[in-house]
Image (spheres, grey):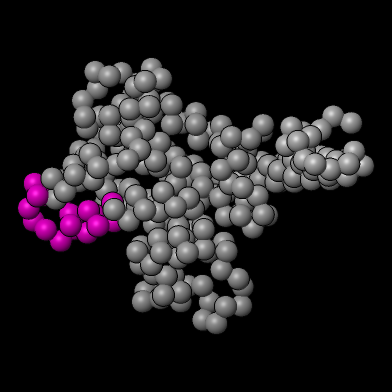
Amino acid sequence: MNYDDDINELKLSDFEKNGLQIYRNYKTSFHKHEIKLFIEEYDRGIYENLKDFEQVLDLIIKEDIKYLPIILCSFADACLEKLLKRIIPEGVPGGSKSILDGFGSLSSFSNRIQIAYIFNLLSKDILLELNSFRKIRNDFAHQWNLGESKKKLKTIINSRTMKIEELLIESGKISSDLGEDEQWKCHLIFFVGRIYYESELYYSCVKKGLNPSTVLYSGEQTPKLFKEVTRLVHEYLSEA
């Protein structure tokens, strides 16, 4: 039997190595089968929010950047609300409406971000960035001096550790001649794509005991929704 390098280096008998290799092969095969079943199950689904996603992409292209935190947070809040409605169990005292609406415990955007972080409903980096935009959105909503709020927005834009627009320029997907605002809009197009995509499938991966990063983004096979979201993202990038 051919052993994996790490197994081959172990100080074990051939019999023990055989057993360990067979177990690993079985576990790998079973895991791949679980991923295949997961993707097949969700590929049969109908994603009704794609039109909302497209509308947000269109607004990102057209609107001034000072309005984008409000648009982004509104869309993300709606995505989180729909996700929570799907996962709150039936029979909860008072019903899910009492939790999500009015003065319910999950009625605010900030509470939804927190609960999503605690229970791993979306990638942590998405939720942390959303929380930054939430603070800027609040500034825009409560201050008449939009110039000051726009400065704060610029500070957040420039302080990001990962700038998708720079990777897009390096890969030739967008032009380096784009202005700073247009480059940032390219980042937002990708960001909104991840919010929508993960709000549909991320937690389902977690529930199945699967690694969302592998299944949703980098596996041998990815869900059809990934291809559809990617198509729309690239379509709107070409308009940026």
Q: Is 82 positioned to the left or the right of 55 in the image? A: right
Q: What residue is drawn where x is 20% and y is 38%?
A: 64
> What range of the chain is rendered magenta?
133-148
x then y, percent, for residue 67: 22, 45
Locate residue 227: give its quadrant: top right
* Residue 139 included in the magenta stretch of the image: yes
| Secondary structure character of the magenta stretch overall | helix
Q: What residue is drawn where x is 38% and y is 27%?
A: 167
x then y, percent, for residue 75: 38, 50
Q: Is residue 81 visible?
A: no
Quadrant assignment for the N terminus = top right
List the single residue furthest toward the front.
Answer: 11
Q: Is 215 positioned to the left or the right of 154 in the image? A: right
* Residue 227 included in the magenta stretch of the image: no
Q: What residue is drawn where x is 46% and y is 42%?
A: 194
Q: Is 198 positioned to the left or the right of 22 in the image? A: left
Q: Is residue 124 visible?
A: yes
> Which residue is nearer to you in this view: 221 or 103?
221
List the single residue furthest toward the bottom.
Answer: 93
> Which residue is nearer to you in this view: 115 or 235?
115
> Which residue is nearer to you in this view: 75 or 204?
204
